[in-house]
Amino acid sequence: MTARAYPSAVAARRSPLSWPALGWIALVALIAAQLFGLLASPPERDMRHLQKIMYVHVPAAWNAFISFFIVFVASVRYLWTREERHDLLAASAAEVGTVLTGLTLMLGSIWGRPTWGVWWTWDARLTSTAVLFMIFVSYLALRAFTDDPERRARWSAAVGIFGALNVPIVYMSVRWWNTLHQIQSSPSTVDPSYAWGLRLNAIAVLLLLIYFVAKRYEIARAERDSEIRREERALRQEGGHA
Amino acid sequence: MSEEPGQRSLPGGDAISLRGITRRFGHKWALRGIELDVGLSELVVIQGPNGSGKSTLLRIIATAVVPTGGAGHVVGLDLRRAAAAIRSRCALLGSTNGLYEDLSARENLLFAARMLGVRQPAVAIADVLAQVNLTNDADERVRFYSSGMQRRLALARIMLREPQVLLLDEPFNALDADGADVVNALIARSIARGAAVLIVLHDLARLAHRPTRSLALGQGRLA
Amino acid sequence: MNTSSRPWDRVRAIAAKDLTAERRAKANIVSVTSFGALTLLVFGFAVGPDSATLRATAAGILWLAVLFSGVLVFHRSYQLELEGGALEALLLYPGERWEIFAGKVLANLSVVFLVELIVIPLAVVFYGIPVPSHWLALLAVVVLGTIGFVTLGTFYAAMASRARSREVLLPLLLFPMLVPVLLAASEGSAALLAGDPMGDAGAWLRLLIAFDVIFVLASLLIFQHIIEA
């Protein structure tokens, strides 16, 4: 039996980031941060308690952009090194990012309804987030419709890089567009009594993001490793080397 | 031909040298570890059943396809790092003709001539058209050609070049006796010129030359 | 026989080949242009006959018509290579992969400009757009917007044309990326048509230029990674 030049899948790759401990810490941090936000800061003048939705909406938005940044870096590293693990990391970050982006949009809409009387407003941040959501979705669709893993990795990397390059441009263009049409925008979040609540929640969601991406990555690696082992077996099975 | 920086003669074939080449498509392995050495002026035949990976092997040597694993050199140039340089020195007549059906034969050849940078393209094109006996149909759209005519056109396109490595994938397909003569003449000229010729064939009957070596490709491995 | 070609020769050869094939299949460009005209008509019905509304929405709808017809052009560009296995032969010529991209972009630009040459006057007629004094700036907006659109369209079509569900995949990939172009082109055109009282058009033009530069460079760099036999 030839020695396999292939490290054992799960044991070697279990990074501390996917330990359940981090998951628990993140959950506790989130609960604590939410409680802080709900209890420690006063209701906003006009919006009262509705404003508290910002404590989930804004951290989700920030972390959605962070996950996109991870997709970008992992995509570049994949094209540079052609090492599959970067592609798997990009895909994992994209999945989590899509959920966070969707959450941001939903919460933005829920906040908007009682505030402006409409379910949607075309303000810069919300609209840019909607476009970001669609870019994530198209990334995942491309992956779903491409069978060959190597081609899927290369194509996803290209789409991920292009999408990331476009994010600031989309944001700027939508913002200019807003100023031309006087769109009502989301409230300012610079009120100091809110700053701490936002930061704490942002960190808590970031911990959750890291945990989920690491976990998803671990699963993806394990799947891929078992697939490769199967292929290696098939490769060896047709007699020995010529 | 000019030397590329980093081009050097290697142990192994000085035209083609492959070590451990593998190629996977999805979950299927087309090539499972190919070791191959071919020298200049050699005529090597590879036989094998359908699906044995013959076409993939030729495509990898011609750099149309990147191998999943392994390494290789064509005329001393690395497959992965010097692919563009290899393409200047290596020509492949594929199993599909790769023609633009809405264009005429002449237009297809003109495109090829411009991509290759052939000097005096009109003269060269007229010359190869005559060799494959397509002069009279040169301005008809390829869409209306028979499969034999299309194959001859693909052959004509290859004859616009004088590569150091000539790869032929089932060159006799769809050709009659006259067409087969053209192929054999091309092979003879190339060998005489000092090129390496690697042919994938179903059966050797129509090949008019004795190969230097005959190999068999089965289930992705060479024997 | 000594042969050697230069990059620009190859780019031109590819563009010429694509355009010749396009000219041959005349039915194609006619149906694409008809589709653009049809889109204008149908949107007109959807928006309603009020001339003020039509004029206000004209620029946006025009660009949508261009987008929808353009997608058809990009698909065709790769269909050409996929039937008869021409793509493999294309990848065997000397030269770099970005040359293939550049040639195709040039060919697609010509075709889309031709479609716009028909569709824009139609929009002027259907939507009652006044002829503007700043027509040169307007031309710049159209040209720059089209360059961004065709660059990204040609890039994404290289992938989408070979994946499953290609009809939906190309718009799905392409349209979110075109939001800045759509905004800049619509708003820039609208401003210029109204005489550009606020001088906004300049900012939109700069955005288009930046967008084009970034994505032309990115496409040329990354195309080699997404194209293969």
Image: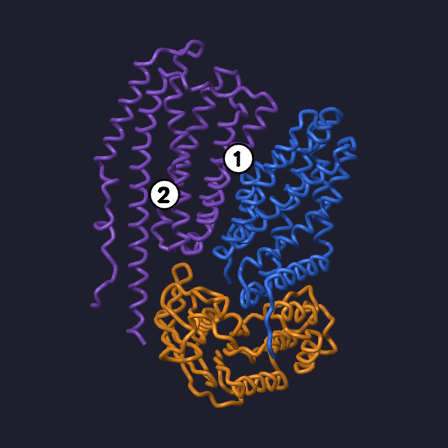
Chain colours: A purple, B orange, C blue
Disc 1: host chain: A
Please indicate whether residue A155 sits to the left or right of residue B148 in the image. Answer: left
Give neighbour class at mark 1: few <14, some 14-19, many 20+ (Cα, 10 Å).
Answer: many
Q: Position of residue C154 (x, y in %)?
A: 58, 51
Q: Nearer the viewer, residue C75 or B192?
A: B192
Q: Which circle marks residue A126 in the picture?
A: none
Tell me the amino acid under the disc marked 1: Val
Q: Chain for mark 2? A: A
> Mark 2 and mark 1, same subunit?
yes
Residue drawn at x 55%, y 25% as measured from the top left: A122
In depth, the one of B183 and A85 nearer the eye is A85
- Residue at image position (38%, 65%) is B29
Q: Position of residue A24 (x, y in %)?
A: 23, 31
- Identity of the amino acid at label 2? Ser
Residue A92: which disc?
2
Q: Which mark is residue A170?
A: 1
Q: Position of residue B149 (x, y in %)?
A: 66, 76
